Image: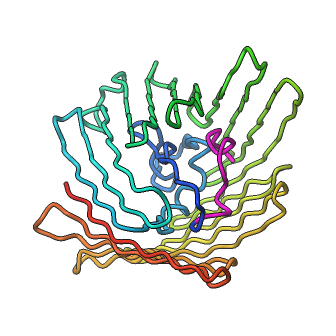
Amino acid sequence: MGSVLALAGAGRQNWPFSSDTPHPQWDTPLPHWDTPPRWERRDGRLPNPGSFHALHHSCKDVFPQQIEGVKMIVNKTLSSFFKASHTFHLSAVSPSQYRFHVEHRQSDSHGKDTDSPVLIGEMDSSGSLNAHSLLHLSERIRAKAVFQTQQAQFMTWQFETEYRGNDFTAAVTMANPDVLRESVILVAHFLQSVCSGLVLGGELVYHRGRHEEGGILTLAGQYSGPNWVATLNAGKGGAHASYYHRANKQIQVGVEFEASTRTQETTASFGYQMELPEANMVFRGMVNSRCIIGGVLEKSLSPLPATLLMGAFVNHRGDKLQVGLGINVG
């Protein structure tokens, strides 16, 4: 819910033992795209609620990202505006591949040059391309475009316009418009800060095809405290609830519950993040109701500009094991 890109692919129900190659996550907040957490606002005014698709980000960031096989990422900052990276991935469950990633963005994410566009592009060894652009049309209006191909075939072309008021956010997204096939996907988002810490809103997804037409309405609510955030999305397509809590400077925990009316499946997940500053390490772990247990350890190899990643995920019900090792340089 909240991302049109999710309509074209498999959901999270199959993670982390899906045979499909995961696509890059383009929903990561970009500079000036999301506001700071609401509990940091102390000027007495109702804050802007942020983007609809970022409602569950606080909880999702606690969970470990799947790592499988051997991966090496080399990052290179070419200038204050340009950054490039090379990714080499050797996998036993999917084809090994190479990815080239380049991005152009503002030199200072907290600067005043908000009119400068953000451009991100990525291509892998199979010829698949992901392109993402973000343009600030004004102080309150932002436009975003996403193009995704799989080899020589277009998979997704998506356009989004978002308006941010003082205490509300409204956005409209159009995805995969096709005049010949008479098909289009339209998504409307709205979030309103009702009072301090409380946000209410909804999402309306409309799909029209040559032989089918329908819509799905999802209502959303979020309540945040000084160190916790509770979020709920519920509609015809299912429900998604999450709870994030920061226990102290080192420990963060998150709980998620997802139910889908389409697949008739429900999943409950628990994740946590533990930071060890003295050892330059961060550990993220998770366990869910599908008997999947996993964890990823990140170790900063100071004074070298590199980070070592080690992870393992076990599916006890399916008797499957995935182990990964990676290094991030730069």
**Colouring of the image:** rainbow
Compared with 127, 28 (above or below) is below
Answer yes or no: is residue 248 visible.
no
Residue 227 screen position, x and y as percent: 51, 67
Relative side of 328 to 147, left or right: left
Q: Is residue 277 left or right of residue 283?
A: left
Q: Residue at x 30, y 37 (%)?
A: 102
Rendering coords of residue 5 (x, y %): 61, 40
- Vertical side of 252 occupied by 178: above or below: above
Q: Quadrant of residue 309?
A: bottom left
Residue furthest top as drawn: 179
| Residue 129 percent location from the top left of the image | 45, 35
Report whether 219 appears left or right of 276. right
Residue at x 79%, y 66% (from the top left corner): 265
Q: Is residue 215 magenta?
A: no
Residue at the image point whose x is 62% and y is 36% from the top? 168
Q: How many marks?
A: 0
Q: Quadrant of residue 127?
A: top left
Against 41, residue 239 (above or below) is below
Location of the C terminus (image quadrant): bottom left
Judge by depth and name the residue closer to the eye, 187 or 277: 187
Q: Nearer the viewer, residue 287 or 191?
A: 287
Residue 238 lies left or right of residue 292; in this view the side is right
Look at the image and give the residue range highlighted in magenta. Answer: 1-15
Question: Looking at the picture, how far across and down is residue 51, in whole percent?
Answer: 57, 41
- Residue 73 visible in the displayed image: yes
